[in-house]
Image (cartoon, helix red, strand yellow):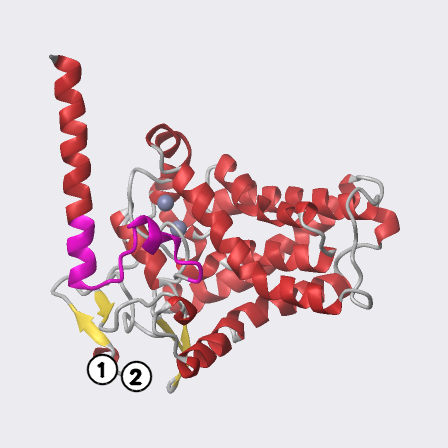
Amino acid sequence: MDDLNFGTRNKRGDWAPSAPLQIASGWVQPFNIKKFLSFFISYIWPWNAFHMGTALLYWAYVIPPAQLMQTLSWNWALWLYAVNAAAIFVLYGGVELFWYVKRKQGTRFKYNGKFPGDQPSDVFWFKSQNIDNFLRSFFFSIPLWTLVQVLFLHAYAIGYVPWLDWANHPVYLAALVLLCPAIHEVHFFCIHRLIHIDFLYKWVHSVHHNSVNPSPWSSLSMHPVEGFLYHAVAFWHLVIPSNPIIALFQLHLAGFGALNGHIGFDKLEITKDTPLESHAYAHYLHHKFFEVNYGGDGLIPLDKWFGYWHDGTKAGEELMEARFEKKKARLNAKANRASS
Ligand SMILES: [Zn+2]
Ligand SMILES: [Zn+2]
């Protein structure tokens, strides 16, 4: 596919889409039913359907019987870690292998014209973004994902929280499934905005931001505090009446879904003429400019409401620059007051 039909490439080789980023169509006024229906299909297919599919597969083949999970034990916890790690290795590693190692698509639709593997840097362990991100994912974030998983499964198994069944609550549970991506977006926006507060940023979140040009391995490359808070989104299902399969779906939206923001390509050419939309651009802009787009891609447009939204256009950039100038002036005034 010719990516220049969909965007532009600058002198550095960075590609950007021509179409501005859009928040979910349900929020756009006047309401347009046609646009909403096409949004709704893209809401379900393919990514959220994939995460629901993996949750169902886990429930059928991976999650131990409730009776076993009534007792906390290393046996089933390590089993869950092994499956989570293997699944991430296959999913993230697959995209890395074909798009970053074999580079089957070259730099077509790639936001940053360079590949992290070609850019050694002192900020990373062993000077390698790939090795650093890989180790942090498998030794910190996936164990913490598993910890969250073990805790909520145990809570359901011992009857600590209500376990609603599908036969008696089909409509409520189906509605809750549809709400999970929105819960994810709100949870992620809140913890993410929190760890952008100066001292938390320095101490915690800067680890994730070392990857200015992210690749799939960057998705879960987090400080342990962030790794826990991020996956703790599944605990919402201990607060609202729910069901462990839905909690698992919520966890997969976080663990597997982190891939989306860090694919680095706008479209993955599955075959020559079959593109898969990555939905990566909003979060790519966050990695590039830091203080924009704290949430996802505008399902619940918190960034828009709080003034952080960058839609990838010139106008978006001007809004961001004006905000940065204001912040600079505020900080300067504070420094002057302190020194006088
Ligand atoms: Zn990120
Ligand atoms: Zn951030």
Q: In this view, does 72 lie above or below 311?
A: above
Q: Give the range drawn in magenta.
A: 299-321
| Residue found 70% across the figure and 64% down from its top | 172
Q: Residues within 10 Å of mark 2 (few under 14, many from 20)?
A: some
Q: Which quadrant would the N terminus be assigned to in this image?
A: bottom left
Image coords of residue 42 (percent x, y):
47, 75
Q: In this view, does 196 lie to the left or right of 56?
A: left
Q: Can residue 15 be seen in this view?
A: yes
Image coords of residue 140 (percent x, y):
54, 40
Residue nearest the observer in this picture, 176 or 72 = 176
**Residue on which the image places disc 1:** 5
Residue nearest the observer in this picture, 3 or 125 = 3
Taking the view exactly as shown, the residue that stands out farthest to the bottom is 273
Callout 2: SS: loop
Q: Is residue 312 magenta?
A: yes
Callout 1: SS: helix
Q: What residue type is labelled 1?
A: Asn
Q: Which amino acid does label 2 sit on?
A: Met
Image quadrant where residue 176 sits: bottom right
Q: Is residue 263 above or below residue 7?
A: above
Q: In this view, does 321 lie above or below 315?
A: above
Q: Residues within 10 Å of mark 1 (few under 14, many from 20)?
A: few
**Residue on which the image places disc 2:** 1
Image quadrant where residue 111 sits: bottom left
- Is disc 2 in contact with disc 1, using a CB cutoff of under 8 Å? yes
Asked if the residue at label 2 sits under 8 Å from ligand 1, the reply is: no
Q: Is residue 204 magenta?
A: no
| Residue found 26% across the figure and 57% down from its top | 310
